[in-house]
Each structure stands twice: as structure tokens, then as C-alpha cells.
Image (cartoon, helix red, strand yellow):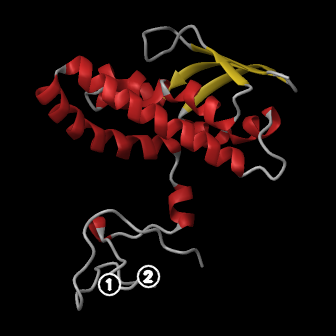
Amino acid sequence: MATPRRMPGPPLAAGDTCAAASHALSPVACRPLLCRVLTGEQAMSLSILEQRRIEAAFAQGIWEEMKEALGPEQAKAILSRAIIRLARQAGADMAAESADGPSLEHFISLQPRWTKGDALEIEVLRADGTHFDFNVRRCRYAEMYKAMGLAELGAVLSCNRDGAFCEGYDPKLKLTRTQTIMGGATHCDFRYRQEA
């Protein structure tokens, strides 16, 4: 059985019980955000699209407050820096999953995480030992942000992660992209190159 993840929020007071109560955490360790505890297996079952939806809903409130207090430019810069930092860490974490270390082959094997649930419709143009080139023809991430009223933040919350993820995964993995659906193009042109 997977170890439950600690959730954010204040710990329960001694004697209180969590509504989830089906886990092995002590009342002091339990942080029952929405009275829910995710095991590692449950967290992994979420698609990245679902994760981004949850993150965007949370970020929306923070964005509105920062925009009001600091102005839209500074708020966007802060949010962008935070997302980039998280993306680099996610890249490093996924690189660590490979017993042989990061490689383009391992990187390509990770792609179903982003396409799960038809989140992306992609057309692979090249996939070999040094290149992974594809076009995204449909992006449900962009559609989701637009539906949430966050079209102006879609690039910050999603597209900006891609290059930073590569930096964290392997600094020798380079991404070139000249256009995105989020930015109004007909498709996104992802061109990954593994440097020697």
C-alpha cells in the first residue's frame, strides 16, 4: 500500500479525526485539505491535464490578488518565475525516474503523461537518438484555460514550463518552438534536440 501524502493545511488538533480516516497518518500529521488524502497511486492516476486544471483554479485566485496589489506585469512575472522553478524541479524528478539517467529515449517515453485523456493531438515528425520533433494539432490545455477565463495566463501556466522542464530534466536537451496554439497559431511546433 502506498504511503499517503501529507496535504497542505493546518494539522488536526489532538483528538480530532479526519473525514477521510482511512489512512495511517496520526491526527497531528494529517492535513485534511477537503478531507482528502491522496496516495502516490491516486496522484499518479491524475492526468497532467487534470493536474493543470486544479493548479489553474488555485493560481487564478492568487493571480487576481497579486494583479490587484502589484499590477498585472509584476504579478505575471512572479507567477512565471514560480512556474518555471516548479517545471525545472518536475524535469529533475522525472529524470531521476530513469535507472540509466536522462536520455531522449526516456524523455520520449514520458510523453503519454502529457497526452493522456486526449489532452494533446500530436503528429510525430521525427523520433530518433538525437531528435524528437512533433506538431500539436489540438491542445486541450489551451481550450481549458480559455474556458476557465485564463487565456491570458495559459502560456505562463503551461507553455512556459516546456523549456524549463528540459533544463531540469537534462541541460543537454534543447527545445525550439516558434509558435503555439495558446498564442493563436494553428499548431505548436515542438523540436527537441539532444546535444552530445
For residue 173, above or below residue 7: above
Whether residue 104 sits left or right of residue 59 in the image: it is: right
Q: 10 Å neighbourhood of mark 1: few (<14), some, or many (≥20)?
A: some
In front: 109, or 137?
109
C-alpha separation, residue under disc 2 versus residue under disc 1: 10 Å
Which residue sits at x=56%, y=43%?
90
Amino acid beneath label 1: Pro
Q: Disc 2, disc 1: CB below 8 Å?
A: no
Residue located beneath label 2 in the image: 23
Is disc 2 placed on a helix, strand or loop? loop
Please, which residue is most extreme toward the bottom here?
15
Task: Characterize the local packing of mark 2: few (<14), some (14-19) or many (20 or more) Cα atoms within 10 angstroms.
Answer: some
Which residue of the protein is positioned furthest toward the left in this rendering? Answer: 68
Kind of residue sitting beneath label 2? His
The C terminus: image quadrant? top right
> In which image quadrant can residue 150 be found?
top left
Say whether residue 55 is left or right of residue 180. Answer: left
Question: Residue 159: image x %, image y %?
Answer: 48, 24
Q: Please give the count of numbered marks on the rendered protein.
A: 2
Residue 116 in view (yes/no): no
Residue 147 visible in the displayed image: yes
Mark 1 = which residue? 27
Image spot of residue 79 (x, y percent): 33, 31
State whether residue 1 is above or below residue 171.
below
Quadrant assignment, res 65:
top left
* Secondary structure found at label 1: loop
